[in-house]
Each structure stands twice: as C-alpha cells, then as structure tokens.
Image: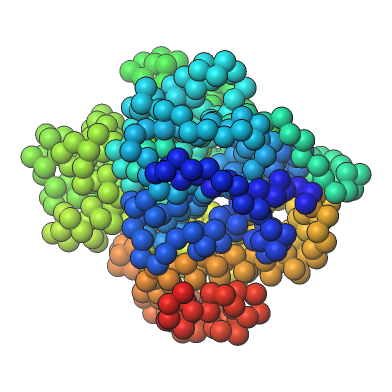
Amino acid sequence: MFGYNGKILIVDLCTGDIEEKPLTEEYAKKYIGGIGLGIRLLHDYSKRGVEAFSPDNPLILTTGPLGGTLAPTGGNGHAFVAKSPLTGGVGESKSHGFFGAELKRAGFDAIIFRGKSETPVYLWIDDGDVSINSAKQLWSLSPHETIDRIQERHGDRSIRVSAIGLGGENLVRIAGIMNDEERFAGRAGLGAVMGYKKLKAIAVRGYKDIKVAEPENFKKICEKLTEKAKGPATRKYRTLGTPENVLVFNGKGILPTRNFRESVFEYAEEVSGETLNEKYVVKIVGCASCPMRCQHVALVREGEFKGAKARVEYESLWALGPNCGIGRLDAIINAIEICNRYCIDTISTGVIIGFAMDLYEEGILKKEDLNGLDLKFGNYKAALELIHMIVKREGIGDILAEGVKRAAERIGKGAEKYAQHIKGLEMTGYDIRALKTAALGYAVSFRGADHNRHGSYGYDIKEVVDRFKAEKGRGKLVADMEDKYTIIDSLIVCKFSRGIYEWYDDLANLYTYVTGMKVTPEELRKTGERINVLARLYNIREGFGRKDDHLPPKVHMVPIPDGPSKNSLVTKTELNLLLDDYYEYRGWDKKGVPTEEKLKELGLEDLLWIVKGGEE
C-alpha cells in the first residue's frame, strides 16, 4: 500500500515478545489511521470491563496515512488510544511535532503495547529494528531529561522520543505524554496508562521513504494548501496564537472565571494574547511539514519567576489563569512549565485547582485539609504548591490526583456541585451556559468534556445561530462537525489548519493521491460517521448510555451572574431536547444507542453484539 507501511507492531511488556502483524487494506480504508484505527484496535485487543490500570488495557500508538509526507500539517502527527483512567471510556489524544513522522519512517503504522513490565523500560525502534531496553536510570526524570538521556545513550540528537514524567509514574489520572520538548498528548490521562505499564518512553529513528501513489497530483495539492496556510485562514495562529481567545471570549461573556462562578475576568487584559506576545513571547516555532508556525514560546525575563519558559496556548492559560482567578502571566507561564516538567495536562490541572479553590471558598475544604494552604481564588503561590502536591500525591493532592469527578465523590459534602467535568474529563475554557450548540457537542463527546471533539462552538461564537437558544437542528450541526473532526484526527491533520481545506473534497483528494485507494468526498464523510459510531459503541460496551451525555451541575443550576451573557444556563429540558434531536439525526434510538440498521449501513456488523446486549 502507498502511504502506509502495512505493519502493526505488537509489544508485550510482560513477556518481552515482539511481533508484527499486517495492516490490511480493509482496515486502512475503513478506519484511515490516527484515532479511527486506534479505536478499532482498542475494540479488537481489549475485553469488556477491563480496568484502565490493568495489563489487559492496551496502549495503542498510531500514525496516519499522510505521516512522513509533505502534506501541510498532516505529515507530523501521532495519536494514543486506550481506555481512559479518567472516564472509563474511549481515551484518545493527539500530538504533532516530529515524532509521528519519525515513527512512520521507522516502518510502522501503529504500535500496540500489551501487558505490564515489572521494571521501567523504554521501547527503541531503529529503522525497523525493535528492542525493549531498561529505563531504571530514567525513572523519575522529566520528559525533557529523558529525551536528552536517550539521545545521549544512542549517540544521536535526531532521535525522536515520546516520554512520561513523574505524573505518569505516580498514576496521576491527568498525566500525558510529551514529545519534541513542547508537544503534548495531554488529555484523557493516557500518560498514567503508560506509567502503569512501566513504559517510560518510546524512542524512534527511521530512514525509510514514504512513497505516495500519485506524486504530481499530490505535489500540486500540497502547493495549493501551503499557500492558503500562509493566508488569512491561519492568521490567528501565526500572530497571537490561540491566546487571542482571551479578549474575544471575555468580550462575549463566555470566559469561564473562578471555576465557572463568572464568565468575565477583570484581569483579562493582563493575561491576554496581546500582552503575552508583547511582553513574553521570544519565538514562534512550527512542526514538520507545517507552513504556519503556531507554537508561541514565552519566557519570563525578570521578577519572581525569572527564567520560566513554556509554550502557551489559550486552554493552558485559561485553566491556570482566569479559571483560578489568577491574573499574572508570569505565574501562569511558571505553572505551565511545572506541569510540563511533571507531564500532566494543564487543562485538567487548572480545573482541579479551581475546583479546590471553590471548595475552600465555600468552606467545604479548610486549611487543615490543605496542609495549611490559603487556597483562595487568585492565590498563585498556593496554586503552584498544589501542583506539586497533586503530582507527588501528598495530602489533599492524593485525592485531587484522581481528577475532579473522583475527588468530588471522595470529599463529599456536596463537592459534586462544583466539579466541572463531563464523563470524568475536566472542562475546557468555554462557558457553554451561553453556547448552546457547543453545550450539545460537549455532552455527546465520546472523550468527555472537550471542544476539540466537535468544534461546534464556532456556530455560536460566530453567530451563525442564536447562541442563547436551544432548538431542533443543532443536532445536525454538531454531528456533521463531529464527523469532520474524526476525519481530521484519523488523517492526523492539525485542526489549526482546518480553514485551508475545502473539507471533504481536499481531504479525499489527499487520501487518494497518497494511498492510491480512490475515495470520494461522500465516502470520506461516511467514514467520519463510522468512526464516531465506533467510539460510541466502545463506550456503550463499557456501560455508558444517555445518562453519561450530561453537563456539569453549574451549567444547569447556576446562571451566569453578569456581563454580556447574564442569566444564561442550559436547563435539563433544553439538554433533553438537544439530545433527542442529535440522536434522531444520527439514526440512534432514544437511549443514544445506534440502531442495527445504522451499524449495517456503516459496515460494523461484527459489533452488533454490543447494541443487542449480548457477548462477543
């Protein structure tokens, strides 16, 4: 096959056995790669009811068919998939940079890690040669230190590495996996799965050529897309980056502040993308095969946090800033740097801290519960100390390391009312009380609370629809965008480049020119639907249903108190209307279960046993 290596590597960390299996043309075309292939393999290589922290929960690493090519933003990504230790459902997380392209050139489309090692190890792939090496001397090191040590050990600074930090080693359920120093597969806690397996890192070096089926056509479309990527469609990412959202969201009254107590932050100017770029950004970096450059690296040059350095995106800035009532960029940059060192998700970390601050302000947590911390909103010193406690599982940190859902259940006293999560995954930086299309997208997301699974916030923010109104027709908007996003994440194209594509037309052409397997835009759209249903089936297999398509209590119960979105919330009646509309458009029943006819239409007959309530 063109565009694919046709190889899946299976690594048993318990026995040390390593084998290769073919990636069939059927699987390549039906599931593409990235999260699509990863979720299919998760079905195939795990049994119903397996715990996230179990040798029988496979950790799956995938590339996409564009990996290693010059496809703009599509030649550099990779995805991890496993059962999430936060949600108990599909856990998937993508990252870009250079690691994915290197893995593709090393000869593999996917790696399935099974079992659990007794001692720390790392996987070493050298242009197709594979070995499991001891990582005892790497255990407890940061990802950056791990990358350096592995490169030194093999005498090559061009080796690409994905690694975990202390967060993953300590089974902190919000741990992620870092590559290329500042790139991060951060959501859903998959770094903790890697830590449970005692897999410290994956190191790759590859020299194989990735051949495409139609080089001339491929070159032409890449040239067209590259030029568009230099234009207005990506201006935001090339200039201020995603931190541009701060003032935009604040102006619309949708910037969640102090754990969703408010939606307008009085210090928005001080933590805005404009201030960040003027005072802190020292360089803007791009990934392999990317003409945009969006990675804004900030450095604190003076003061209390002098020397702190980190890549800053809106979500990290929001979670560790406004969501915690913190209006100092230097403190936020330092917090991001600490999270990176420990390799934990900045979004979940900020939401957990904001949750704890809310409980402290409400008197549910007291100083004696917090090792003496005065955890008021805005106390950046206390917030920074709490990050260390979470990762080291010290005191209250041991409870908070479980994520807000489990932490709220353990703390009790009504703490659940303050836990901002969906399906166990912490919320992101959109106040969906005033974004009702997005609220539906969040509720039905198979990963849990996440704007990047559906992208439907765009309809609300750009005023394509009335963002304050719940009505029929929103289900179609959400489902159609979900299908597009699963294609993006299976090809592993960067979402920041979505504006340069003529959606299914360009992406179908890219796939055809690279692989030689002709696919029409309509077939590609159907593949996006297939992958979404595949993920839904996994969650149903693990006990999920309509009850799990929920929103955080504050979204239902606490209206936005002031600002442009004053009095907005999403009632349960409104959510039920939106869910019914979405399920109907999807061709699912009222419980949110895909029908037998729908599975046959999508070629998923082998999974009918899930919807029929039987056994495999």
Q: From where the camera sits, is residue 516 visible?
A: yes
**Which residue is at the front of the view, 357 or 103?**
103
Colouring mode (rainbow / by chain / secondary structure / one colour): rainbow
Q: Residue at x 50, y 69 (%)?
A: 536
Does 205 appear above or below 4?
above
Q: Is residue 568 left or right of residue 381?
A: right
Instruction: Report x, y in % for residue 15.
Output: 42, 43
Q: How many marks?
A: 0
Q: Residue at x 59, y 25 (%)?
A: 159
**Which residue is at the front of the view, 4 or 240?**
4
Instruction: Report x, y in % for residue 139.
Output: 35, 28
Quarter of the image for residue 229 reads top right
Q: Residue at x 40, y 48 (%)?
A: 115
Spot the residue most to the right: 216
Instruction: Report x, y in % for residue 262.
Output: 34, 52
**Which residue is at the front of the view, 229 or 166?**
166
Does 523 appear above or below 494?
below
Instruction: Report x, y in % for residue 442.
Output: 46, 62
Q: Residue at x 62, y 51 (%)?
A: 21
Q: From where the camera sits, is residue 331 visible?
A: no
